[in-house]
Amino acid sequence: MCNKVCGTMEMLRDRSLDVCCITETWLKAKDKSIFSEIHDFGYDILSAPRKGKGGGVALVFNPKSMSMKVNVVKGFKSFEVLEGLINGSNKVVRLCTVYRTTRTNKKSN
């Protein structure tokens, strides 16, 4: 996603999408300029960067259409996961982005 923010955000806007799950974001917590660019398009992002090189998962959403907060999911070594809770008028919807790399350790969860 790092080098494709503009194209990704234009696709979301042009198709009137309110939420998108993204894997292999390659985002880091320090990528403030990328987060600002996403906000400039009118979207918010919940991101779980991978420690180390590459990877990472994210939920990009339109804050005018929904309220979303992250539910931290830890303890898995064989895949990455980000869980977002979307608050509706009378219910909560749980949306998860899951990515499993092709390389795993034999002692993984």
Image (cartoon, rainbow, N blue to C red):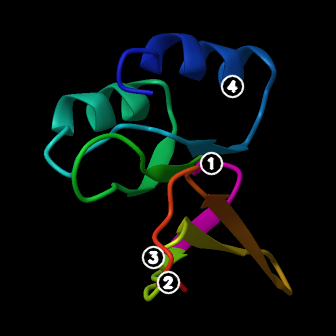
Q: Is residue 81 magenta?
A: no
Q: CA distance from mark 3 to mark 1?
A: 34 Å
Start and end of the magenta stretch?
Answer: 61-69
Is residue 33 found left or right of 40 in the rendered image? left
- What residue is pinned by disc 4? 12
Label disc, if present, on residue 73 of the rendered structure: 2
Q: Secondary structure at mark 4?
A: helix
Q: Amino acid at mark 1?
A: Lys
> Given the current orientation, which residue lies at the most extreme front position?
106
Q: CA distance from mark 1 to mark 4?
A: 14 Å
Q: CA distance from mark 1 to mark 2?
A: 26 Å
Instruction: From the image, state whether disc 4 or disc 2 is nearer to you.
Output: 2
- What residue is pinned by disc 3? 77
Q: Amino acid at mark 2?
A: Val
Q: Amino acid at mark 3?
A: Lys
Picture coordinates of residue 47 (x, y %)?
A: 41, 55
- What residue is pinned by disc 1? 64
Crowding near pointer 4: few (<14 within 10 Å), some, many (20+)?
some
Q: Earlier in the sequence, mark 1 or mark 4?
A: 4
Crowding near pointer 2: few (<14 within 10 Å), some, many (20+)?
few
Is residue 10 found left or right of 1 in the rendered image? right
Instruction: From the image, state whether disc 3 or disc 1 is nearer to you.
Output: 3
Q: Earlier in the sequence, mark 1 or mark 2?
A: 1
Picture coordinates of residue 9 (x, y %)?
A: 56, 22
What is the quadrant of residue 3 in the picture?
Answer: top left
Instruction: From the image, state whether disc 1 or disc 4 is nearer to you.
Output: 4
Crowding near pointer 3: few (<14 within 10 Å), some, many (20+)?
few
Picture coordinates of residue 100 (x, y %)?
A: 61, 58
